[in-house]
Every structure is written in structure tokens, then in C-alpha cells.
Image: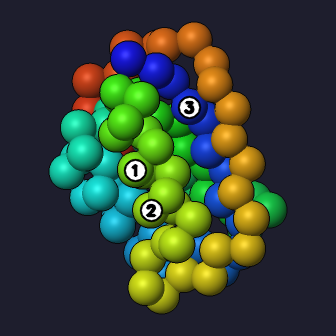
Amino acid sequence: MEHINIKIFGKVQGVSFRHSARLEAKELGIAGFACNEPDGSVYMETEGSKEALGQFLDWCKNGFEFAEVEKIESFSEEIKGFSDFVIK
């Protein structure tokens, strides 16, 4: 089990990115949350297996079909024990 924080920049607000990320996370067995940031980015904290988180990061780089991902930042952190993936 690992914890990764992800910040996604580009056209990612107002295009159902968080909702799509939630569906993808649930399919991969990832818990955590996604929220919009004031700077127009989407911030997520995610927990799951190393393999699932790798697949999720790959998904984030391509983004949802209506999104235009310009850049992703990610870093590991201590596990917080999320039990579900929610949109904030």
C-alpha cells in the first residue's frame, strides 16, 4: 500500500475530470479524494497498490477526453488510511 499526492494542471476543471478520476480510481481499487484548487488545477490524494497507482498516474497524464492535461506533479507521503475515493 502506497500514498501518492497528485496535482494536475491544464484544462481540468469544468470538464468532469474529478468525476472521471473517481470512476477510474474505484475501478483500480484506489482510495482517496479529488478536489479543485483555486489556481485551476485538480489536487488528489490517492492510496492503493504500487501497480494500481502507476496505472492511475498514467490515466491522469492522458486525462479524461474533455480535459487538456499540461503537467502533473506527484509525490509520496505517509498512508492516511482512506477507505473510499470521494470528490470534495
- Can you tell which of label 1 and label 3 is closer to the viewer? 1
* Nearest to N terminus: mark 1 or mark 3: 3
Residue 23 in the image: state x and y as whole percent: 26, 58
For residue 85, what is the image quadrant?
top left
Above or below — where is 88 with respect to 48?
A: below
Residue for badge 1:
55
Q: In the rendered structure, which amino acid carries the disc numbered 2?
A: Trp
The crowding category of the residue bearing disc 3, from other C-alpha atoms within 10 Å (few below 14, some 14 to 19, many at least 20), is: many
Residue for badge 3:
4
Q: Which mark is residue 59?
A: 2
Q: CA distance from mark 2 to mark 1?
A: 6 Å
Q: CA distance from mark 1 to mark 3?
A: 12 Å
Q: Secondary structure at mark 1?
A: helix
Above or below — where is 83 with respect to 42?
A: above
* Nearest to N terminus: mark 2 or mark 3: 3
Residue 68 in the image: state x and y as whole percent: 62, 82
Residue 16 visible from this viewpoint: yes
Q: Secondary structure at mark 2?
A: helix
Identify the residue at image location x=47%, y=14%. Answer: 80
Q: Secondary structure at mark 3?
A: strand
Q: In the rendered structure, which amino acid carries the disc numbered 1?
A: Gln
Relative to residue 43, is residue 70 drawn left or right? right
Q: In the rendered structure, which amino acid carries the disc numbered 3?
A: Ile
Pointers 2 and 1 in contact (C-beta within 8 Å): yes
For residue 5, what is the image quadrant?
top right
Quadrant of the image containing the N terminus: top left
The crowding category of the residue bearing disc 1, from other C-alpha atoms within 10 Å (few below 14, some 14 to 19, many at least 20), is: some
